[in-house]
Image: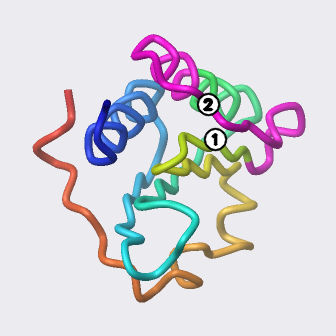
Amino acid sequence: MIKANEILSLAYNAADDKRAEDIVALNMNGISLIADYFIICHGNSDKQVQAIAKEVKDRAEEEGLSVKRMEGYDEARWVLVDLDSVIVHVFHRDERDYYKLEKLWGDAQIEDMTSTIS
């Protein structure tokens, strides 16, 4: 069984490969019962937002992971990819500024992902 931190790295790298901007990984342990980690990032166009979300989904499925849910893909304003222990939030740049999820989850520790970038 793949561990949550491995799923985190996989999803982070998938987003990075599609040039997601300002990627932040939040450790949600002890803060949220929903997931162990959140990834928050954004794209600068609808097409880029969709490409980022699709890459995360495709990479997860290639590793045999079940994508529990993907919402918001058609609208491409805020796409949520639920990988069970990791939830990826892919925003359009304008929506990210509006929702400010990093502030909402301000108690969460930011994970240093520099060593996992492929």
Q: Tell me if residue 111 comes above or below residue 101 in the rendering.
A: above
Point out residue 21 in the picture as x, y percentages from the top left corner.
46, 47
**Bounds of the magenta span?**
55-78
Q: Tell me if residue 23 comes above or below residue 51 in the rendering.
A: below
Q: CA distance from mark 1 to mark 2?
A: 7 Å
| In-image side of 7 versus 18 (left or right) | left
What element does badge 1 sit on? strand
- Identity of the residue furthest to the left in this view: 115
Q: State how the image is colored.
A: rainbow
Which labelled disc corresponds to residue 89? Answer: none
The reply to whether the magenta stretch includes residue 76 is yes
Q: Image quadrant for the C terminus? A: top left
- Identity of the residue furthest to the front in this view: 1
At label 1, the amino acid type is Val
The reply to whether the magenta stretch includes residue 26 is no
Are the two marked residues, 1 and 2, in contact with CB atoms closer than 8 angstroms?
A: yes
At label 2, the amino acid type is Val
| In-image side of 2 versus 52 (left or right) | left
What element does badge 2 sit on? loop
Which labelled disc corresponds to residue 81? Answer: 1
Q: State the residue at coordinates (16%, 48%).
A: 114
Residue at numbered disc 2? 67
